[in-house]
Amino acid sequence: MRYSELANVYEKLEFTPSKLEKTDIISEFLKETSEDVLERLSMLLTGQVFPEWDELELGVGPSLLYDTISFVTGVKPAEIKNLLAKEGDIGNVTEKILKRKVQHILFKKELTVEQVYTSFGRIARAYGSGSQNKKVKYLAELLSNASPKEAKYIVRTVLGELRIGVAEGLVRDAIAKAFNIDVKIVGRAFMLANHIGIVAKAAKTGKAALEKIKIKVFIPIRPMLAQLAPDIQHVLKELGEAAMEIKYDGARVQIHKKGDEIKIYSRRLENVTEALPDIVKMARKAIKADEVIIDGETVAIDTATGKPRAFQEIMKRFRRKHDIAGMLERIPFETYIFDVMFINGKETIDMNFRERRQVIEEVIKPVKGKFGTAEQIITSDFEEAEKFYHYALDKGHEGIMIKNLKALYIPGARVGYMYKIKPTMETLDLVVIGATWGTGKRSGWLGSYFLGVRDESTGEFLPVGKVATGLSEEQLKELTSSLKPLIEYEEGQKVMLKPMLVVEVAYQEIQRSPNYESGYALRFPRVVRIRDDKSSREADTIDRLISLYNHQATSENREA
Ligand code: AMP
């Protein structure tokens, strides 16, 4: 298939605001696509090249991309940045520059979707010394054969910002429509395979092929998420008898085991096995099953105080590439398993939680203080629940989880099958979409951050205000170095960023605001912590923000 066909569809989608129409456009396009390219094409339609759990990533940041565009077009990087400050989008800038260069067309050979995909693969596989040069070379080859419109979408894909308002959910609906299959069946297959391309390809073959898609060991599953509940009483009234567990204040781990091989995935589905040899060792000792996928939380207990250490300390270990053994002694981990998704060839996600808990209890032989099952009580009694809550807090944990004993495991969903109860006010996980350079003592650091809230249907981030407080100098420095590679362009003191980094933000109140695209603003926002464990697709959504707004006890809506 010619890449220009895909570029035309991208363009149509970009200028079609209606979600229904977008679904129709994609569904028609998928119907016409032959089976051999359907998998890659469906991925590209969501703006992804590899599934989120794949270790491959393009690894081309904004500045390497601009250098490549400059190399291909002869336009200086400084001019590209000037144009970018005016246009606000590197895709549009590249298209404009290439349009000016008419002779460019003479050297062109027609690009196919397959070739573009293969080139992306080569870019991602360029590792080690000289990898940057190789990446530039492959990308330059691609761009010099691209038409202005094709180049626009290639560079946007490289930066991971397609800006056509299409997220996976929309492609899932389009697949159902194109191949006339119940969207629930397509949705379930997507939940299990975690790869929209594989699902599209199976759907073309038919319903039976989709139903054959199963959970596989060493392909991580999106974790089930919790809902915040206002208080214990509220939840007990809804559930009656329920399981209460300590909400360990650590980081989520998804452990996969097959025979002797163990892999650990973070909440963002990254393979973190290498950084956590101690958990691997303990898991090997404690898990008495040949093949299993389990869900748990790992915490670092400070031996001096007996309380969990700060979240940032845990994340340091997850990110560690060197001196892993040294860190292991300084920050030892304890891991508590609270769920199971797969065991010995069988999915357990359709069992209820009471049954799943039984499975974990049978499979895990605890190693004291190192690896075990989450501490749990089952009760419908408010006083007992309250006592357990205080016990969890006294141990220094965040609070408790209250779980519906009859509920299934729904990967990737926040369905209210488990509730979290914690004493602090609800915070929001927002994405840093821009920042400003500090002045005076803070010059050279990115100081104030523009925040974005996720629009689930389009995958884009809507501005919801800015935050300038809550971080220590050390954190500001750390954040600046994480954000610098994400700079897309600068306008005076202001920088616009690739939306990747998530921060947890506390605030006094949510207000309506015409000043921000989301329609809302946060009053007195403060950064609580940097959420390295979350990817931007896990940031809070505009729907959640609206729901919090509607439920908050402000004078404004109390009167309403
Ligand atoms: P939050 O990140 O605030 O949405 O809270 C949900 C998170 O709590 C989960 O993603 C887990 O990482 C963590 N957690 C800690 N203890 C438990 C537990 N016993 N059951 C489920 N999740 C837990």
Image: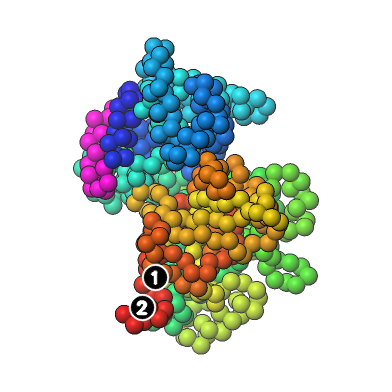
What is the magenta segment's predominant secondary structure? helix
* Range drawn in magenta: 16-36
What mark, if any, has residue 549 been given in the picture? Answer: 1
Residue 57 is situated, as x and y percent measured from the top left of the image, at 53, 36
- Nearest to the observer: residue 35 or residue 309: 309
Q: Quadrant location of the N terminus?
A: top left
Q: Is residue 543 left or right of residue 470?
A: left
Q: Nearer the viewer, residue 357 or 539?
A: 539
Quadrant of the rendered structure where residue 23 is?
top left
Image point 28% across, 52% down: which residue?
A: 184
Other-residue count near label 2 (Cα within 10 Å), few / some / many at <14 / 14–19 / ≥20: few
Residue 557: mark: 2
How far, Cα to Cα, is label 2 from label 1? 9 Å
Q: Residue at x 44, y 59 (%)?
A: 464
Q: In the displayed orientation, state which residue is furthest to the top.
A: 106
Q: Amino acid at mark 2?
A: Asn
| Residue plotted at (53% across, 84% down) | 386
Q: Amino acid at mark 1?
A: Tyr
> Left or right of 4: which side holds 52?
right
Q: Where does residue 316 sit, x and y in percent of width and height? A: 68, 53
- Residue 352 appears in the figure: no
Residue appearing at x 22%, y 44% in the figure = 21
The earlier-in-sequence mark between 2 and 1 is 1
